[in-house]
Amino acid sequence: MRFETLIALRYLRAKRRQSAISVVTVIAVVGITAGVAALVIALAVNNGFRVDLQQRLLGATANINLIHPQDDMIPHYEQMVERLARVPHVMALAPALYEEVLISSQQRSAGIELKGVEPQREVRVGDLLRHLKEGSLAGLSESFSDADPIAVGSELATDLGVFVGSTVTITSPQGDLTPIGIVPKYRKFRVVAVFDSGFYDFDASWAFTNLGAAQRLFDLTNVVSVIEFRVDNVDRAPEIAAAIQRAAGKGFETTTWMEENHSIFSALHLERIVTILTIGLIVIVAALNIFITLAMTVMEKNRDIAILMSMGAKPRQVWAVFTLHGLLIALCGIFLGLAAGYGGSWVANHYQLIHIPADIYALSYVPFRSRPWDGVWIATMALGVSFLATLYPSLSAAKLLPTEILRYE
């Protein structure tokens, strides 16, 4: 072991008469630990929300949507589906018909988004109908003499007080024109399934029926409002969407999952930047404690420095002693901070310690997803700031003149 490192390690153990230096050293270690741990945990929360929201949104919605803004509907969609299925990178596609409707049970009513789908195609594009709590997917293809089939979200089923086998009324805003005005059109639907995606917005305000039933309710024939796509690489969605739009022809437009959820992910990105800037101040304050510790140590050890230099130690070696002393303090704090941050994040995520209202945040608990890369750059940043804090005290120690110090000894 080089003598610079040996001396730096010995300086970490302050003598009894140097208790003030020991206290400041402990404060510096605690400060670095708190700053690093706070950054790891805060970024784990940010990353957890981003990853969970992205996974659930990608599972619940299509990667790409094809619409026809001018007519608001896509006629003869089967021909379009067959042609677009051959576009490269398209894994699955499904036609769908959307409309906002009023759903009513014997207890209460609610406004929801009703989606008419072809069940076997829909499950290849989205995952909502894969997470069935009650009933079966085959029920959406059944026909009843007095009603059409419908699948509702678990939160919506609870609010309405319905279950599999219950009958509800769907009222469409597109009614029939009569001498007394437009009379809303309604049909009876039988609940054949209840899905539970874990995403509150979908579980509380979405319902599915088959495409034929939706077309009958809205007085439409052989048309859909959108064709949805699942692709093999969601990060290339804009590029694939452009190819789909070219294949569809003039008048068609596409939207991607990135565009539809741009505001959510932009807010999370901004929150990440603000988190780094604000919590990073803790590390800077801890680095100031390292500066104070080294300054006090240099003042206390000036006689030792003079003896070392008179015995042949070079200024560069004296500088290395105090720089290593400051970096060792930082490394202790960084190690403890990473252990506390990653350990705390794992425990909080595994046991779902922090619960939040799902109707506000779309998730029932705070997810913690720590990334190894975050720990690397946090440790590098903390070490860099600590190194800057050691420069002035270390250079001051290296510039001491041993003759001036030992003159009165």
Image (tube, rainbow, N blue to C red):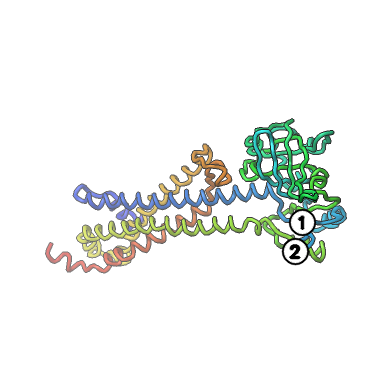
- In the shown orientation, is residue 56 left or right of residue 404? right
Label 2: how many residues lie within 10 Å, few (<14), some (14-19) or many (20+)?
Answer: some
Label 1: how many residues lie within 10 Å, few (<14), some (14-19) or many (20+)?
Answer: some
Instruction: Assess whether mark 2 and mark 1 are in contact (beta carbons under 8 angstroms).
Output: no
Image spot of residue 271 (x, y percent):
50, 56
For the point 52% across and 45% down, the residue is: 368
Instruction: Classify mark 2: helix, strand or loop.
Output: helix
Residue beneath disc 1: 89
Quadrant the N terminus occupies = bottom left
For the point 54% across and 47% down, the residue is: 369
Image spot of residue 337 (x, y percent):
42, 48
* Furthest residue in direction top, as rendered: 165
Residue type at mark 1 is His
Residue type at mark 2 is Ala
Residue beneath disc 2: 242
* Furthest residue in direction front, as rendered: 179
Q: How far is the residue under mark 1 from the one under mark 2?
A: 12 Å
Viewer-nearest of discs 1 and 2: 2
Instruction: Classify mark 1: helix, strand or loop.
Output: loop
- Pick whichever, 149 or 127, lies toward us: 149
